[in-house]
Each structure stands twice: as structure tokens, then as C-alpha cells.
Image (cartoon, coloured by chain):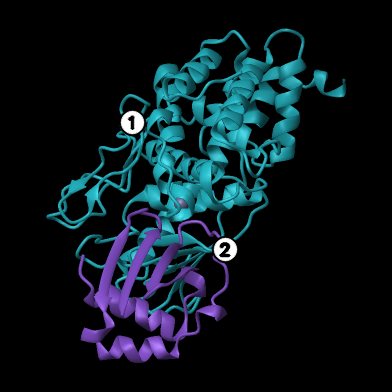
Amino acid sequence: MRCAIIPPHVLDHIAERHRDERLRELAERTLAIDSGRRDARAAAQLIASAEPTSGPSAPKRTIHDAGHRERLPGRTVRSEGGPATGDKAADEIYDWLGVTFDFYRSAYGRDSIDGAGLPLVATVHYAVNYDNAFWDGSQMVYGDGDQQIFTTFTGPLDVTGHELTHGVTQYSGGLDYSDQSGALNESLSDVFGSLVKQYHLGQTADQADWLIGQGMFASGVHGTALRSMKAPGTAYDDPNLGKDPQPADMAHFVKTSRDNGGVHINSGIPNRAFCLAATAIGGHAWEKAGRIWYDTLTGGQVPTDADFATFAGMTHATAGKLFGVKSAESDAVRQAWTTVGVEIE
Amino acid sequence: MKVIVTRSGGFAGMVRRAEIDSADHPVAGRLIDEIDLGEVPEPAPAADRFVYDIEIGDRHVSVGEADLHGPLRELVDYVLAHGGS
Ligand SMILES: [Zn+2]
């Protein structure tokens, strides 16, 4: 192959530095088949550990203000490269979109939500006392919270990572938003939402809090966060809000017609599986466990109605491909799913 | 007539329930007269959007946040504001 004449250190350089995904992939493949100095595993690790760099691909952010109305996108308050607005929510989201964009680019070589540089559009101050944030299929939308239970949806980085990942899942073929496939959809948003935060803080798996929505509750609410990936069901226990309803394993799977079949409840099971795998593998969770989940999600093979067992089997297969079928990484993935009661055939 | 609103879903995934009796709330009674539940579309699941289960007497409907308009929206907002919890 022609590329064999390119010295390995140049390929290293391309794989690490080049922001064009196709060229990166070519460099990866070439490294993988190159004459024995490296194998596919080393190449995968090399890509997974690529340092963040500035390059030709940069985010294209636009922040709008709905002025507490429900019309989208609302008045433009900040465009890419523009000065800070002085509005806390608008400036937080501008920054968090940038961090999330940088995370996907640096960790997985992904260029924005669609992998092709999609502009990032967000609206803040949506509706009155609105206790929610969502991805509407083309943009992100944030309420201010009612100030009684929730004080912010723009403050915690993982909320933005979560919402943006709904877009990544959508552009990867989608997962039907009900029952187990819906809970997987939710879980993937929590997984990468948490990973964006860990990446931003430079934390390893054992240093991370594995919480979703830490810092959103008003003072007086008995709880630390909305969800705990490490210990589902323990994030809050409040006289008014009730107790965190997430199950930690299949034996406690919740059957309900609400919330599209409990997609925000049963996501606790795959959330914990990811946390267990990442913690067993060790190091920065986005590098190996995150790479396994990311490659599975974006590989184009996940059925839109996938259940937990189907997705679990696919993560195990991906781990085998990336790190070897007898690798510690592959074992960690199998063990993690087994612990939460999902058997891999 | 009893009106019960149960909101689920949203990023937080928390359930909020509220209930009133239209006999005590003439505003709600007037809104109920204007509501045609036959017009409400089947809820289309959408990531992190609220889902509302609405019971009006012995009638029941599930509606997605994006499809909640007009007098039904006004009724839901009213019940959530005045129906406790
Ligand atoms: Zn979500």
C-alpha cells in the first residue's frame, strides 16, 4: 500500500492532530496494518488519547433568547466569536456548547452533532418557570427553572452534554424513545453528558462523581443531583419530590406507562453498567469505555428498537474489536452488564 | 367534575400530579366546556419533553407537551397551579 512509505511518526501526527475525520481514519487504518510496529489496538488507543487541538474544525454557535415566550429560536444574542452578553444563561450555554463540541472532536474525532459540522443552536430563557431542557431535533432549548425546585438548567455542563448527545443519537440512526430502547437513548445521553464533564475536569473514572444534574436543586431540596450512574436510586430523597426512582439492576426494572415507559427511570440500569465498565477499566472513562460505547452507537448497527441485551451484546463485540476478545476491556464490559442483570450471549 | 393532571418525562424525569374539582373552580369548568378531546393527537415520543396524562371526569387523554394548546393547555396550567403537590 502506498501509505506504507509514510513514516509512522507522521501517521501518528496525522492521527493525533488532523481534524479531518476521513484522513484520520485512513491514518488509523494504515497504522493498524503497518508492518508490525503497531497493531490495531495501539492505533485505537492512540486515537482515543488524542490531545485537544485547534484545527480547521471549530464550533458554529448561535445563542438565542426566548424572553420567556415559547417561540423558537427567539432573538439572537450571541454568535460564534461574539463578545459575552452579560446574561449568565446565554454565556454559560455558549461555553458549554464549546466544551461539548471540543469533547466530541478531541475524544472521537467527531465534527459536531451530525459529524459534518452542524451549527449549534440554543435558546435560553424559554417559557415561564420552565423546569426543563430539551433537544427538539434541530436545536437545544433551556428553561430557567421554577426557582422552587430547580434553580438552573444552564449551569451544569452535563445537561448540555446530555441534550447534545440526543442529537448525536438521532444522527446515528436513532433509538425509539420508549421502553428499553428509549431508556438506552436516555442512558447514552447521560453517559456522554457525564463524560463531557469528566473530560472538562480532567477526571479519571474513580475520581468522577457520576452524577447527572448536580447543582440544579434549590436549597432546601433533599438531594445532590437528579440521577446517580454509580448508585441509581440514591440521587435524591425529598418529602415533596419523593425518592429517586431509578433501579440499579434488571431485578428492579420499573414497568410504567408514564414517561414513555419510564425512559428516565430504567436508564439507571445501562447507566450503572457503563459506570462499572469504566471504573473496572480505569483511567479516563472517555478513552476506552467511552470509545466502546461511542463506536457501538455510531457504528450504524444498533436497531432503533434495541433492548438492553442487544445493546449490551454489541458493546461487548465492539470491545472485542477494539481491544481483543480476551482483553481486560472486553471482560470488564461483560462483567459490568452481568452485574446489572443483563446477560450477554 | 374531578380533573387530574399527571406530568411525567422532561430532562429530570420527575412525576408531578395535581388535582382539582371543577365544582370549586368555575374557571376550570368553563375551560372544560371548550375542550374537544377528540382533537388531541396521539402523543409522539420526543426526547426530554413532558408528557401529560389528563383525566377529566371519566375521560382520559395523553398528550405531548408540543401538542398541548388552547383551552386544554390553559386547563393543565390551571390545575398544576391550583391543584397542589
Ligand atoms: Zn434526555
The answer to whether residue A234 is left or right of residue A34 is: left
Chain ID, purple in image: B
Quadrant location of the N terminus of chain A? top right
- Which dot marks residue B44? 2
Decide if residue A337 is in sight here.
yes
What is the CA distance from the residue labelled 2 to the residue labelled 1? 31 Å
> What color does chain A have in the rendering?
cyan
Residue A307 rendering spot, x and y as whole percentages: 58, 36
Task: Establish if A187 lies above or below B46.
Answer: above
Residue A94 rendering spot, x and y as whole percentages: 43, 60
Which of A282/A15 is in front? A282
* Disc 1 secondary structure class: loop
Question: Quadrant location of residue A318?
Answer: top right
Question: Quadrant location of residue A301?
Answer: top right
Outermost residue on the front side: it is: B58
Q: Nearer the viewer, mark 2 or mark 1?
A: 2
* Disc 2 secondary structure class: loop
Residue A67 rendering spot, x and y as whole percentages: 38, 79
Quadrant location of the C terminus of chain A? top right
Disc 2 chain ID: B
The answer to whether residue A303 is left or right of residue B53 is: right
Decide if residue A98 is in sight here.
no
Task: Establish if B58 lies above or below A309.
Answer: below
Disc 1 chain ID: A
Question: Quadrant location of residue A269?
Answer: top left
Q: Residues within 10 Å of mark 1 (few under 14, many from 20)?
A: many
Residue at which label 1 appears: A230
Q: Amino acid at mark 1?
A: Lys
Residue sitting at x 41%, y 80%: B73
Task: Tally the numbered discs.
Answer: 2
Which of A266/B5 is in front? B5
